[in-house]
Amino acid sequence: MATTTQSTAVPAHQLVHEPQHLPDLRSNHGAYLARSSVGWLKETSANTSLEEMRARYSADGYLFIKGLLPREDVLDVRQMYFEHLAPTGILKPGTSPRDGIFNDTQNPIVHNGVGGTDLPEDAERQRLLESAHTLPGYLAFLEQPVFRAFVRKLMGWDRDVILKRTLLRHNVPNGLSTGCHYDRIFLRAGEEFLTAWIPFGDCTAEGGGLMYLENSTDVGKAIEADFTKRAEHFTPEERINGFNQNMAKDGQLSHNVVELDAEINLTYGKPDEKRRRWLAADFTAGDVVFHNPYMIHGAVKNEDRLGRIRLGSDLRFYPEGGDIDERWMRDVWRPNDGL
Ligand SMILES: O=C(O)CCC(=O)C(=O)O
Ligand SMILES: [Fe+2]
């Protein structure tokens, strides 16, 4: 059930809908965020004007488009991925790979995916995670002309380049999720790149979707300026390393969203400003969220009541000829690529 929270003077396309029950959001460690620190991502319908989409992206640092991609194509990738991983025992016996239901008799940590901190120890599991990134159906999905044309139109680019290193990340229920970060930590060149996060399957806020810190572009930039200052004496190799000694072990700002929220509020909150909330969504297959290099975000811990495995992919686009982090152009994701 959605209720409208703004006055009727606001044009219909700018209305923000606040369902009555905000989700319980937490990351790998720590408590749930207080409800007063939680909100919903602003939805944009696929037929919104380009001008309005650009205005939202620029003002909010993200653009959450409902139903941009054909649902069945997105679910085809989900099915393909879980058929590929099925030999690892990740799926509940008797369920379909298209549904992607976790076999909860298994230890979630053994079934860690890419990005949820440490990889599974088992070499065969790692090999399958790696080869999933070269499944022909997945690579074809990334090349969809309509989607790529949309990215160029949104950004006003004549030609786009998609980085070869995309990340297909699954998070099983009660397993580990991606920590909180902004993408520029890992992509050390170019100010203009665009990230598209695609959930492959329906995924509720509490089922491991992304959460974004509201209006955090400036905070990301301020943290980056601080890292840059503290890295002045570093060698160029150290500076380009997202895991350098300024950073947490795995380059994330934090795996505890409550702690990070308090720290950011203390350091960057202003008494006359409304406290920033963490914005989440119930995603459905076909949705895409675009975000800028400095927006702070992370994955919610997957506590899906239906046992669904969260699968998403992060794609990054640059304008052709733009300043690019070439390390991400070398190859698809590999377990030991050091990035
Ligand atoms: O899928 C995830 O867990 C993280 C995605 C992400 O950080 C991104 O798309 O930039
Ligand atoms: Fe990210």
Image (cartoon, grey):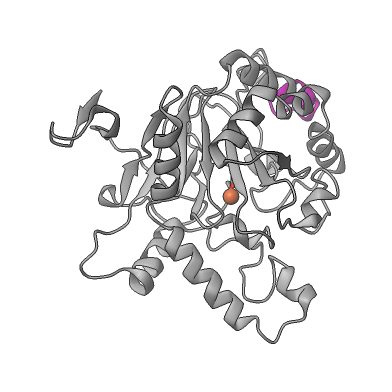
Left or right: residue 271 versus residue 63 is left
Q: Eyeballing the image, is 132 above or below 30?
A: above
Q: Position of residue 186 (x, y in %)?
A: 67, 59
Locate ligand 1 by image quadrant: top right
Query: Is 219 a magenta residue?
Result: no
The one nearer the camera, 61 or 27, is 61
Q: Eyeballing the image, is 269 above or below 210?
A: below
Name the residue rendered at 79%, 48% in the picture.
Answer: 121
Query: Is 86 a magenta residue?
Result: yes
- Quadrant where the image shows the C terminus: bottom right
Q: Eyeballing the image, is 80 above or below 64?
A: above
The one nearer the camera, 169 or 275, is 275
Q: Which residues are magenta?
A: 81-91
Q: Is residue 172 visible?
A: no
Query: Picture quarter containing residue 82?
Result: top right
The one nearer the camera, 99 or 312, is 312
- Quadrant where the image shows the N terminus: top left
Q: Position of residue 138 (x, y in %)?
A: 75, 26
Name the residue rendered at 48%, 44% in the picture.
Answer: 300
Left or right: residue 22 versus residue 202 is left
Total marks in image:
0
Q: Position of residue 326 (x, y in %)?
A: 80, 56
Name the residue rendered at 42%, 58% in the picture.
Answer: 216
Name the residue rendered at 67%, 39% in the picture.
Answer: 158
Q: Position of residue 114 (x, y in %)?
A: 70, 44
Q: Farthest residue toward the bottom? A: 233
| Helix, strand or loop for the magenta stretch, by majority | helix
